[in-house]
Amino acid sequence: MKKTIEKSVKGTLIRVLKFYEKNDYALSITIALAIASVLLIYSYIAFMKPNEFISFSILDQQKEAKNYPELLIIGENNTCYLWVVIENHMERSISCKVLLKITKSPILSMPLPIEGNMSYDMVISNGEKWEEPIELVINETGDFHLVFELWIYNEKTDEFEFSDNFCVLNIKVIEA
């Protein structure tokens, strides 16, 4: 079986070489495509930016993504304890802010077209982490969406721009 495969490969190589001997045009195109492929791969690797990203999380009271509050009872436990955590992996310092927006309305698009209830501003160096505890008291019954939006300062436009990073927590608040 091994000798049959070797004969088949040798035969194929011989046919390919004979084809290229008869057709210089096909050989030229093959060589040009091979060089272009190598140059394309090299330029992709050489000019590729490192993975730059921002990690944006809302965590529970124990700084885990597990036990988020879902039900608050006015007069008993209507305080919501959370952590906002941002990690900068952008290869530069960033100025940013987190807007907390609270709404009962359906969320149709981001960013929400309403004013923020709370705002947290910070400058985070490359490789650094920013953590902030949030204590939020809700004294009204209903089904709420807590929307956390991350905004990054753009030096070129001199404005904060929505980063497309957001977290939404749904909380039901009832009377005791």
Image (tube, rainbow, N blue to C red):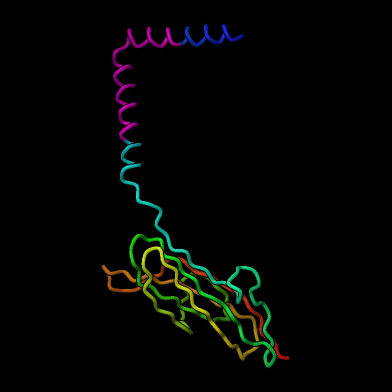
- x 49%, y 78%: residue: 132
Quadrant of the frame with the N terminus: top right
Q: How many numbered discs?
A: 0
Locate residue 172, reporting x and y percent: 66, 81
Residue 17 on the magenta span:
yes
Residue 28 sits above or below residue 164 on the image? above
Residue 23 on the magenta span:
yes
**In terms of depth relative to the viewer, which is nearer, 83 or 15?**
83
**Residue at the extreme bottom of the image, as rendered:** 75
- x 38%, y 70%: residue: 124
- The secondary structure that most of the magenta stretch takes on is helix
- x 31%, y 69%: residue: 154
- x 35%, y 60%: residue: 91
Locate residue 45, reporting x and y percent: 35, 42
- In the image, 64: left or right of 17? right
Q: Quadrant of residue 136?
A: bottom right
What segment carries the magenta color?
Answer: 13-39
- In the image, 12: left or right of 152? right
**Residue at the extreme right of the image, as rendered:** 176
- In the image, 139: left or right of 20? right
Locate residue 144, reporting x and y percent: 60, 80
Q: Quadrant of residue 66?
A: bottom right
Locate residue 2, reporting x and y percent: 58, 10
Residue 87 sits above or below residue 171 on the image? above
- In the image, 128: left or right of 106? left
Quadrant of the frame with the C terminus: bottom right
